[in-house]
Image (spheres, rainbow, N blue to C red):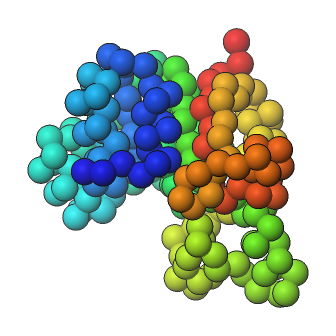
Amino acid sequence: MTLREEQALIARWIAPGSRVLDLGCGDGSLLAHLRLDRDVTSYGIEIDSENIVECIASGVNVIHSDLDRGLSDFDDNSFDYVVMTQTLQAVRYPNRLLREMLRVGREGIVTFPNFGHWKCRLQVLRGRMPVTRHLPSTWYDTQNIHMCTVRDFEALCAEEHIEVLQHAAVDTAHRSALAMRLLPNLFSEIAVYRFRRHG
């Protein structure tokens, strides 16, 4: 399985030999890579049956579950990292899930589409919900129910007493440029954050 650039960036942030939980793990490609490249112990949570079949075929430990039900099956501090890629905006209570991530894991890593990107802003000014490369679905055909901007996410982290350790601002090809690094809320299409509880 080939990693997306965003997943490759996440893989570089994860220490070898660690314990990883991937929320909304998809086909399991990130966890399969981490097992081979970083010797991690991992579990994935996924709701889509076809993705679960692919995970099993790749030897990825996967649990069929709905993230909106929380992570009550896992004890406190069960993992070193809890990862969630392109899923934060699709869950019913993102703030609760962030708390759960940091209850069961020492650190969290999330990626999400940035609703503050200039193309989104332009379409909203024209009176329409955005359809872009990083938000390709129309408003009536999307799983995204809680869109946020880079600033929104950072404000939520401050409210929840979450410390941001690393972040990256990239486009849909997962490349970064100077404008994205200087003004991520305006120019990044996808945001990537690594964080932990304060203290």
Q: Residue furthest top?
A: 199
Residue 5's x, y, as percent?
46, 48
Which of the 4 image quadrants contains residue 120? bottom right
Q: Residue at x 60, y 32 (%)?
A: 194
In this view, 95 is above or below 171:
above
Q: Would residue 16 appear left or right of 148 to someone viewing this image?
A: left
In this view, 173 is above or below 42:
below
Residue 190's x, y, as percent?
63, 55
Name the quarter where the C terminus is drawn: top right
Residue 72 appears in view: no
Q: Residue at x 71, y 25 (%)?
A: 163
Which of the 4 image quadrants contains residue 196? top right
Residue 44 appears in view: yes
Q: Residue at x 44, y 44 (%)?
A: 7
Q: Give the number of callouts.
A: 0
Q: Would residue 142 appear left or right of 64 to someone viewing this image?
A: right
Q: Residue furthest right?
A: 125
Residue 47's x, y, as percent?
33, 58
In this view, 49 is above or below 25:
below
Q: Would residue 94 appear left or right of 36 to someone viewing this image?
A: right
Residue 185's x, y, as percent?
80, 53
- 178 and 148: which one is in front? 178
Q: Residue at x 31, y 32 (%)?
A: 34
Which of the 4 image quadrants contains residue 78? top left
Q: Residue furthest front?
A: 178
Q: Would residue 64 appear left or right of 177 to someone viewing this image?
A: left
